Amino acid sequence: MDGGSGLNILYANTLDAMGIDRVRLRHSGAPFHGVVPGKQAVPLRQIDLPVTFGDPSNFRKETLMFEVVGFKGAYHAILGRPCYAKFMAVPNYTYLKLKMPDPHGVITVGSTFQHAYRCKVGSCELASAVLATEELALIRANIPEEAPDSN
């Protein structure tokens, strides 16, 4: 859940793990910012997928548009404001709950603080790896080439 995100994001490795053929992807829009710290992210393509919340006795299903990205993330997908609007969902970040109306009552989706912490640590590690790789590339680019031995 990311109420600050204006996009629903799906990672390409998640798409592959779901067994969805990339032929179903369509051209994507403009690049976006905020997923990779300090970097512009360019989606590979877009896809519409059905998303279901709840259980067999009380569920809700809607089709959401996802930007498919080719980099790694600590999550399978990021559900942003477009998801919340479509499901009329209300997040409570304090209790890690997402609630949405349904004809049979309220659907509540939750997580644990331990799982949220593991995902946050994973996100930080991925961001650090990306930044370290870029810093290393800058350092290498600024090291002058050694002159060949004249012996």
Image (cartoon, rainbow, N blue to C red):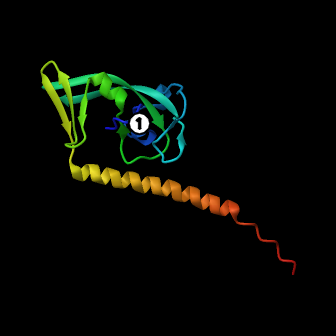
Q: x, y percentage for residue 88?
A: 26, 23
Q: Is residue 71 above or below residue 148?
A: above
Q: x, y percentage for residue 33?
A: 50, 39
Label 1 crowding class (10 Å Cα cut-off): few <14, some 14-19, many 20+? many
Q: Is residue 122 left or right of residue 24?
A: left
Q: x, y percentage for residue 40?
A: 54, 41
Mark 1 — residue?
10
Q: Is residue 84 left or right of residue 147?
A: left
Toward the viewer: 44 or 121?
Answer: 121
Quick one: SS at disc 1?
A: strand
* Residue furthest to the right: 150
Instruction: Identify the residue at horizontal 51%, vertical 30% (top origin).
Output: 45
Q: Quadrant of residue 4?
A: top left
Toward the viewer: 25 or 64?
Answer: 64
Q: Is residue 72 above or below residue 150?
A: above
Q: Is residue 18 above or below residue 147?
A: above
Instruction: Identify the residue at horizontal 50%, vertical 28% (top origin).
Output: 23
How many numbered badges does the structure rendering display? 1
Instruction: Identify the residue at horizontal 51%, vertical 54% (top origin).
Output: 130
Toward the viewer: 13 or 107?
Answer: 107
Kind of residue at badge 1: Leu
- Quadrant (top left/top right/bottom left/bottom right) for the N terminus: top left
